[in-house]
Image (spheres, rainbow, N blue to C red):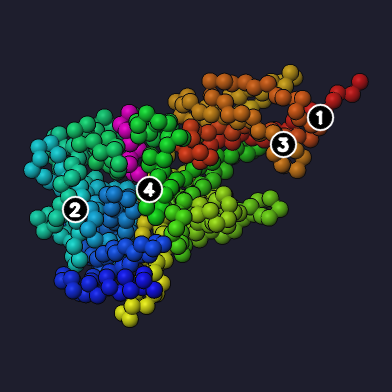
Amino acid sequence: MMIAKFKLYILLLATLIPIQCGDEVRRFIEKEDLTVELGLIGSITGYIQTTFGSGGEFANWKLFLMQKSTNKGYLAQINALGEFSFSNVEDEKSYTLYLFNPDYQIASALSLKTDHAGAIERYFNPKPGRLPYLIIKGQTMTFNQPNELSVDDSYLVSDVDDNAVPDGVAPFWSLTDKASIEFLNTQFDRDGDGITNIFDNDDDNDLIADLIDEDSNDDGIKDLYAASHDHYYPGDIEMFNSGIERHEQADGTFIHYLTMRARAANDLSVKSIKILGPESVLSGGVGINTNPDGTQGEFRWEGDLFDDGTHFDMATGDSVYAAKLRLANFLPRRFHCIFLELASEYTDLDEEGENVVKQHTSYYGRGIHTTELGNITASIDDNNLVSISGEPFPEALAYEWTLLIYDANGRTIYESQTLPSSTISLQLPTQALPQASDLSYKVVASTFQRTAGYPEYSVHSISNSLDLSVPTE
């Protein structure tokens, strides 16, 4: 009863606050005995055009309005006239903009000129209503009237050549040595190059791609043992990553799987979590699940992530959501990204002061970085020595590998310790294995794990027959 009176009291106070726009609303979120008031901007509309004045060039392109502090944001599709709109944007936050082509390849980042020498600004504080026109200049875009915005001066990006292009963006989103120590920010842009960590191929600017970097943010702690790198998001979504598997078949062809996982905050009321991404990668894909008897099933995937324990999402109701997709087309290309669409529910007060359940939608993006994948081969000699060969990842890249042995029913009966790629052989522990003639084995090579249990890439060898039966005299 006390909480209800407290909510009503704040609601009455809110009616006394001057409202700058008719569609501004107030949201109340209740956690235990604490009621927190968050402001929402009703809607923000805008228009985007090329430098030569055409807005129709960007029909079906996407704009991502992203918060600085949480990396969450709002996704809008541009119409045939170059117009776009964001709904229910939280106020009193700093935002930047990213542009994506219709196939979700990142194309352009926001750049705002500043009086600071050798630097530009990227974040601003939106207001209800209309944004100044956006002008596209290749890999950067800017507002035609930036003085109409409140610019966030707390974060600057290096621009030593003063060309209004962040130094880290200048080589078109590739690995670069143009990061800025002066403007270093460890939270959301580790190397200060102007590319937010979740989209940056190289967060710490050590010229090692994040997907193969054991310490991608250079904090002195391996990513595997820290929750501070670009898989992690502060707020409603706590973790979001993806991994690709390559399975070699007996006929020399390959099957590829894409697994996407997210962990929501335990106290979040999730309505649904979906994936949006490049049709060239996701369309025609088949969902993979685990049946109650442990066998693998297939289903028509419509973008959902699941928390039911049967979709590679760990356990039912543990706030980990996942989906595994057998890809029908080809692997992601450079700059491809996926977005998590989170629909959550919260308790609000209606005009009579009664509790009502409402829904809020937000988006979280991340790059699905690409690498060339090869194959790995395993063999077992007469002395039961397992040997590996091949180059599963490019440029003789270091990796980890594991041996798996299966019984006649395809059930795993043995998994070896994880070995570095510098170790190319392993003695089979025959004393711990059945003396059977109908076994099989394979090896799996994986990039170094940055989040436990979730390698970014893994390559599976062909499954071979294994005979460990006692020889007859």
Q: Label 1, label 3: how many angstroms apart (C-alpha)?
A: 12 Å
The residue type indicated by label 2 comes to Phe
Report x, y in % for residue 29: 35, 64
User: Can residue 138 be seen by looking at this rendering?
Assistant: no
Q: Label 4, label 2: how many angstroms apart (C-alpha)?
A: 21 Å
Circle number at residue 435: 1
Location of residue 427 (image quadrant):
top right
Instruction: Determine contact: label 3, label 2, CB under 8 Å.
Output: no
In the displayed image of the protein, which residue is found farthest to the right? 473
User: Can residue 262 be seen by looking at this rendering?
Assistant: yes
Residue beneath label 4, please?
A: 233
Instruction: Determine contact: label 4, label 3, CB under 8 Å.
Output: no
The crowd level at tag 1 (other Cα within 10 Å; few <14, some 14-19, many 20+) is: some
In terms of sequence position, does the residue under pointer 4 or pointer 1 come before the other?
A: 4
Residue beneath label 3, please?
A: 413
The crowd level at tag 2 (other Cα within 10 Å; few <14, some 14-19, many 20+) is: many
The crowd level at tag 3 (other Cα within 10 Å; few <14, some 14-19, many 20+) is: few
Residue displayed at 33% across by 74% down: 5
Q: Which mark lies nearer to you, 4 or 2? A: 4
Report x, y in % for residue 320: 51, 52
Instruction: Determine contact: label 4, label 2, CB under 8 Å.
Output: no
Q: Which residues are magenta?
A: 197-206
Q: Is residue 20 found left or right of 289 in the rendered image?
A: left
Element carrying mark 4: loop
In terms of sequence position, does the residue under pointer 4 or pointer 2 come before the other?
A: 2
Instruction: Determine contact: label 4, label 1, CB under 8 Å.
Output: no
Report x, y in % for residue 4: 36, 73
Q: Which mark lies nearer to you, 2 or 1? A: 2
In terms of sequence position, does the residue under pointer 4 or pointer 3 come before the other?
A: 4
Vertical position of residue 215 compared to residue 97: above or below: above
Residue beneath label 2, please?
A: 124
